[in-house]
Image: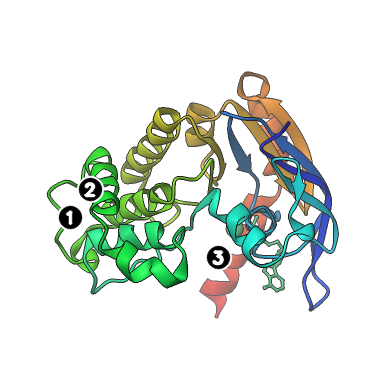
Amino acid sequence: MSVLEARAVSFTYPDGTRALAEVSVAVEHGEIVAVLGPSGAGKSTLFKCFAGLERPTAGQVVVEGTDLATLRGKALRLAQHRIGLVFQEFHLVGRASVLSNVLVGRLATANPVTSLVHWMSRADRTVAVELLTRVGLSEQVRKRADSLSGGQRQRVAVARALSQQPELLLADEPVANLDPVLAAGVIDDIVRMVREEGLTAVLNLHDVTLARRVAQRIVGMREGRVMFDLPVAEVTDAILADLYANEGLAADAAAREEVAA
Ligand SMILES: Nc1ncnc2c1ncn2[C@@H]1O[C@H](COP(=O)(O)OP(=O)(O)O)[C@@H](O)[C@H]1O
Ligand SMILES: [Mg+2]
């Protein structure tokens, strides 16, 4: 059984924008899959459907055999808790400590009635500190989140996502806000943690080099469709050039408009 499956998923935003057109992708246990594609391809929309944050207009998102659309209330929350999310923006509480930010991930799995007690639990703290240590932040545990660098903040976000002990990690352009050297370091940390925990991961990336280095499989998306779904060794430069064809032109046009304005 696939860990995660999109079955002919289409998605249209309320304004009529068709972001996904019959996307089918299956992710198997233990795989690291990179989703690549130009801006506007539908990567983030697919991520939101996978995470249950948006409901497909047509088609199904199936998590370990269960169609997310058939779940309500507690059952839906439980299914969502099996999925750890990392976004481009780190979504940390800047004034709270690094440790508190990670403990929020533990809180997400707790019963609301016991969550205050849970907050104080020694076991949770142990898990949180251990995760922070594994992403190289053992010295930062007590610091305010907003005192950290961008790369460190995204590592806190990764530790938070993993602290809920998910089976699947979804990351939407997790390093898009970081410079290339920092980006590579954070991606390497994410992938190392995913492997150590025996998790499955889907990473939306814009950086082809990073994707090739860490993924076993690459799904290429463009204009809401899957253009290819191949083992990384079969993804040639020509295939990638096709995927991004004309994107440079669009960016150039945007830059010219900016200069003209
Ligand atoms: N909230 C929204 N409302 C309307 N259209 C949207 C919204 N979010 C994204 N889109 C559009 O949906 C398409 C896919 O966007 P997105 O999933 O963000 O692509 P990507 O993450 O690959 O850049 C684009 O045409 C984008 O402009
Ligand atoms: Mg996006």
Dot 3 or dot 2: first in sequence order is 2
Distance CA(mark 3)–CA(mark 2)? 45 Å
Categorize mark 2 by other alpha carbons within 10 Å: few (<14), some (14-19), many (20+): many
Q: Report the mark closest to the observer, 1 or 2.
A: 2
Residue appearing at x 73%, y 36% in the figure: 26
Residue 98 % position (x, y): 23, 60
Amino acid carrying label 3: it is Ala
For marks 3 and 1, the one nearer the N-term is 1
The residue carrying mark 1 is 141
Q: What's under tag 2, amino acid-wise?
A: Val
Contact? badges 1 and 2 (CB < 8 Å): yes
SS under mark 3: helix
- Identify the residue at the far top of this view: 233
Q: Are marks 3 and 2 in contact (CB under 8 Å)?
A: no
Q: Report the front residue among 148 and 56.
A: 56
At horizontal 76% and vertical 34% (from top left) the residue drawn is 228
Q: Would residue 153 appear left or right of 235 to someone viewing this image?
A: left
Specify the quadrant of the image occupied by residue 2: top right
Residue 54, position as x, y percentages in the image: 70, 65
Reading the image, the residue beneath label 2 is: 129
- Residue highlighted by disc 3: 255
Residue 172 visible? The answer is no
| In-front residue for pair 3/158 | 3
The residue located at (70%, 54%) in the rendering is 41
SS at mark 1 in the image? loop
Residue at 80% in and 62% down: 11
Q: Is residue 5 above or below residue 174?
A: above
Above-or-below relation of 213 to 14 = above
Q: Nearer the viewer, residue 251 or 173?
A: 173
Badge 1: few (under 14), some or many (20 or more) residues near its Cα, within 10 Å?
some
Q: Is residue 35 left or right of residue 224?
A: left
